[in-house]
Amino acid sequence: MRLFILGLGYSARHFVRRFGGTFTHIAGTVRDPGTRNDLAGIATHAFSGGGPARETVERIRDADILLVSIPPGGTGDPAIKAFPGVLAAGRHRKIVYLSTIGVYGDHAGGWVDESTPPQASLERARLRLAAEQAWRDAAHGNVAILRLAGIYGPGRNALVTLRAGTARRIIKPGQVFNRIHVDDIASAIMAAIHRPGGGTWNVCDDEPAPPQDVIAYAAELMNVAPPPEEAFETAEMSAMARSFYASSARVCNARLKRELGVTLAYPSYRHALDALWRAGEGR
């Protein structure tokens, strides 16, 4: 199988590290190939939303698997706009699109699943929904939409932010989030590749929890005092950071397990932080 990745970011690179040996050829896009020195074995192509190079178009045309990890912009999905001829060519290929559970919007901590109608209030969530539909149309339905929870893993977790002194305990009563470790994202991507046909699956852990609980648990592992609690209403935060607290929901992953057969390596943040701490994170 030949794999092409649109957007070689954190999750996509981790997928290649785990499952790269499955593919006969791997290529993908980065904004600036000169800034990436951790992509050995991957043929990189520059792409920042403009007109693509001919070689990039050819590699996408030849791909058996297309993994899409580029967020939509204000004018829609940049990849669909840049490669309409290739995507409309009708070649039989599997497309996996990485979306977000943010499309469900605010449910005041209630449970949601894939049958729950999205009610995105934020512009970026509305753009995601539009991008999901655009990829369904481009792939004639043969696209796996993976709605990811808050992503964390090696180098990107509460242990690291605590050690760096940037962790905060923002308290908003009733606020809960789901999370997902990049190992489990990689497993979900591989399962979606092997499953015939398309569909939509939530990729999240078993235990939605308040964000301050994650910080407190990491601090306990490190045997350090957690940062002081800050009330959400009065905490100084950027508009982007504050917007992440606009939605509160508990997201169900039963379909991920039932239909894709994924067994989570890290069903809760505690399992993951325990393993990350043993691996030396935050030290």
Image (cartoon, rainbow, N blue to C red):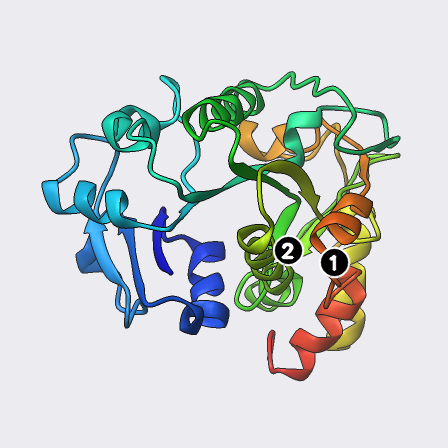
Q: Give the image location of residue 117, x and y in percent.
A: 74, 19
Say few, some or many: other residues with alpha carbon within 10 Å of mark 2 (under 14 / 14 to 19 / 20 or more). some
Query: Residue shown at 80%/66% (left/top)?
Result: 270
Q: CA distance from mark 1 to mark 2?
A: 7 Å
Q: Give the image location of residue 28, x and y in percent.
A: 30, 53
Whether residue 79 sits left or right of residue 169 in the image: it is left
Name the one closer to the observer, 182 or 254: 254
Say few, some or many: other residues with alpha carbon within 10 Å of mark 1 (under 14 / 14 to 19 / 20 or more). many
Name the one closer to the observer, 162 or 255: 255
In this rendering, the answer to whether 270 lies above or below 89 is below
Whether residue 19 sits left or right of residue 241 in the image: it is left
Q: Are marks 1 and 2 in contact (CB under 8 Å)?
A: yes
Q: Is residue 219 visible?
A: no
Q: Give the image location of residue 60, x and y in percent.
A: 27, 44
Amino acid type assigned to the residue bearing label 1 in the image? Ile
Amino acid type assigned to the residue bearing label 2 in the image? Ala
What number is the disc on residue 7? none
State the SS at label 2. Answer: loop
What number is the disc on residue 215? 1
In this rendering, the answer to whether 41 lies above or below 112 is below
Disc 2: which residue: 167
